[in-house]
Amino acid sequence: MRIYDIIQKKKQGEALTKEEIEFFVDGFTSGNIHDYQASALMMAIWFNGMTDEEITDLTLAMAHSGDMIDLSGIDGFTVDKHSTGGVGDKTTLIVAPIVAACGGKVAKMSGRGLGHTGGTIDKLESILGFDTALSKEDFVKTVNEHGLCVVGQTGNLAPADKKLYALRDVTATVDSIPLIASSIMSKKLAAGSQGIVLDVKTGSGAFMKTVEASSELAQKMVSIGNSAGRKTVALITDMDVPLGNAIGNSLEVIEAINVLNGNQKDDLFEVSVALASNMLSLVHSKSVEECEKMTLEAVGNGSALQKLKAMVTAQGGNGEWIETPDLFPKAEHSFEIICENDGFISFMDAQKIGTASVVLGAGRESKDDEIDFSAGILLRKKTGDKVQKGDILATLYSNKKDSFSSAEKLLKGALEFSSDYTKTNNAVIKVIK
């Protein structure tokens, strides 16, 4: 078998066999197939696509290119959640405790933020002492004892995907739905959970800008998961505006605590309830409606918040910060952005707002950048809100006072106004099973 013939076959629009795909993944991971050959194949896939069977075979080959996490030591049904990335998306901090409080087991590996999208691991590390690098034994023990544990991704999880993504990033082939779907799902399958709920974002702050493209990606990933024997569901959720009001690590943890306390009923609450209910539906084989009642009860009686505190404590963090969020360190400087118009906010470019938070120090532009956990943005107004001249649109927080000017320019440039009310999208647009 030769990589030349595989490239030629895909260039002609033909479907590759399982053996050909495994030959490519094995050869590229080991270094026997060169970058320029892999680049040619990625471009052929970009132009000609892949069948569902090809995508599943590619996903499984990449998943098996490194460690396959064994969760058999966990007592109960394990369920995972993955978001395709957005601004202000702190749903894991809300959803995982709810699911754990209702009898599910959430053994989750998460990533760090890069660019305008935040990372769950960065948010959790804003809690004093929180350890995201547990041993496998402690990871399993924490899930068994408390129902949830969130750690950083292992370095050898789907290494073929890591190599391919770096190549796609420099060859303009990132935006291929078969390659996106296999990239995401290879890591989810390798992570070992029995059930997977996918949160596929759509809109200005998401990678997929339209509902149609998001739905196509979601359908592919659900098909892969089910074909691999995992119960899989996808939700299409709105990312035309940041999720919730807080953007930035400790600010987002505090907002998640606020939701778990039952004090915030907004788009963040709505998306979190939908994700948790669908996860519990996989766990208990009950209707989403029945599981929604369980979700609301776990928030209402405080058991979900106590699960978050238990996880934080078990992973070395200061659990008192969960019950007393005022303990989180505050940024030295703050700056209010004042509205200059009367009317309504008609549009928010979520990506630009996310970039503004990076400028303040809340994110990283390269993987080696250090994060200011206290930096970020609190939105006071969002799309659809009525505003008057002099209203506070947002408050910026940073330990770098000289960052405010650039961040203010970005945030003001992200907003559009109109004299008439603008209807906003539903927070949860559709569910794909």
Image (cartoon, rainbow, N blue to C red):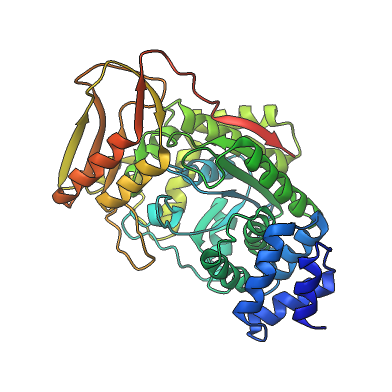
Q: Residue at x 27, y 51 (%)?
A: 359
Q: Residue at x 50, y 56 (%)?
A: 150
In which quadrant of the rendered image does the C terminus lie? Answer: top right
Say whether residue 196 is visible: yes
* Outermost residue, bottom side: 32
* Outermost residue, front side: 12
In percent of width and height, residue 290 lies at 69, 28
Q: Quadrant of residue 179?
A: bottom right
In percent of width and height, residue 315 lies at 43, 60
Say whether residue 67 is visible: no
In which quadrant of the rendered image does the N terminus lie? Answer: bottom right
In percent of width and height, residue 293 lies at 62, 27
In percent of width and height, residue 109 lies at 54, 59
In the rendered picture of this protein, how many numbered marks are placed on residues?
A: 0
Q: Quadrant of residue 322?
A: top left
Depth check: give the residue in front, 192 or 147. 192
Q: Quadrant of residue 235?
A: top right
- Relative to 76, say whether 135 is above or below: below
- Is residue 128 found left or right of 45 in the rendered image? left
- Relative to 79, say whether 392 is above or below: above
- Is residue 411 found left or right of 134 in the rendered image? left
